């Protein structure tokens, strides 16, 4: 399936000057998520991943299907104040603002092999912050899987030196 044909460009959302890459038509296609999951899982098939860490909220949609395809656990990284038990917290910058992310302190067994999954890497701020959370929680970051990469923003350069896989680039 040609996934890129199912991504819509929405100009000036959520702020003037941002071209929002809308993945909802991919989600609506019956082969959309299965294709994304299969391809990201295949890229890390020999990496003995213990957990996919997915980032709220679009990262939950992609990350859970990838964890199912790999056959590993899923750990949610959430926006502040949503996780009920003790958390690690980091602050980070978005393409269009700042935010904080949290993970449960006991979410990851020490030394577990982690794949971080999100729908899009733009500036890389969210993904870099998530790597810090994985570190704080005691995981070993193996790599990143993204559905979309916005190359002009050079987000990869903000990430630690691990395998970064993206399915669709702009
Ligand atoms: O590489 P970056 O510049 O950090 O941007 C990428 C992040 O931005 C979006 O999330 P957003 O915060 O808009 O939240 P959402 O998933 O809840 O829509 C997207 O889902 C990524 O998580
Ligand atoms: N341009 C963009 N389109 C969709 N999601 C995003 N997240 C950060 N930048 C984005």
Image (cartoon, rainbow, N blue to C red):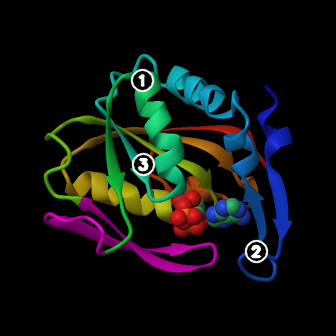
Q: Secondary structure at mark 3?
A: strand
Question: Magenta stretch mostly in which secondary structure?
Answer: strand
Task: Tell me: residue 153, above or below residue 33.
Answer: below
Q: Position of residue 20 (x, y in %)?
A: 75, 65
Secondary structure under tag 1 reads helix
Count up the numbered dots: 3
Q: Look at mark 3 in the image and give the residue it sits on.
A: 54
In the image, the residue with mark 3 has its CB under 8 Å from the nearest atom of ligand 1: no
59 and 89: which is toward the camera? 59
Q: Nearer the viewer, residue 54 or 49?
A: 54
| Residue 82 horizontal side relative to residue 160, left or right | left
Q: CA distance from mark 1 to mark 3?
A: 14 Å
| Residue 89 among those drawn in magenta | yes
Is residue 163 highlighted in magenta? no
Q: Disc 1 designates what residue?
A: 70
Q: Quadrant of residue 111?
A: top left
Q: On the image, which quarter does residue 22 sit in?
A: bottom right
The magenta segment: 81-103
The quarter holding residue 79 reads: bottom left
Residue at the top extreme, as displayed: 46
Q: Which mark is residue 127?
A: none
Q: Is residue 56 left or right of residue 97?
A: left
Tags 2 and 3 in contact by the CB under 8 Å rule?
no
Circle 2 — which element? loop
Q: Is residue 133 left or right of residue 26?
A: left
Which residue position is annotated with label 2? Answer: 13
| Real-space Cα separation, disc 2 to disc 1, in angstroms | 33 Å
Q: Position of residue 45 (x, y in %)?
A: 45, 18
**Position of the N terminus by quadrant:** top right
Using the image as rendered, state which of residue 138 and residue 73 is in the foreground: 73
| Picture residue at 83% right of the left edge, 65% below the top | 10
| Mark 2 Cβ and ligand 2 under 8 Å apart | no
């Amino acid at each position: 399936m040609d996934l890129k044909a199912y991504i819509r460009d929405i100009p000036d959302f959520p702020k003037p000057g941002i071209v929002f890459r809308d993945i909802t038509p991919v989600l609506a296609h019956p082969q959309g998520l299965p294709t994304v999951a299969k391809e990201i899982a295949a890229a890390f098939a020999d990496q003995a991943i213990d957990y996919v860490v997915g980032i709220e909220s679009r990262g939950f949609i992609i990350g859970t299907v990838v964890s199912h395809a790999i056959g590993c656990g899923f750990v949610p990284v959430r926006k502040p104040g949503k996780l009920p038990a003790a958390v690690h917290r980091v602050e980070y910058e978005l393409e269009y603002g700042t935010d904080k992310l949290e993970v449960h302190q006991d979410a990851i067994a020490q030394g577990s092999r982690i794949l971080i999954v999100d729908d899009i890497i733009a500036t890389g701020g969210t993904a870099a912050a998530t790597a810090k959370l994985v570190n704080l929680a005691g995981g070993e970051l193996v790599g990143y899987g993204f559905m979309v990469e916005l190359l002009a923003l050079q987000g990869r350069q903000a990430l630690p030196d691990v395998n970064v896989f993206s399915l669709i680039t702009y």
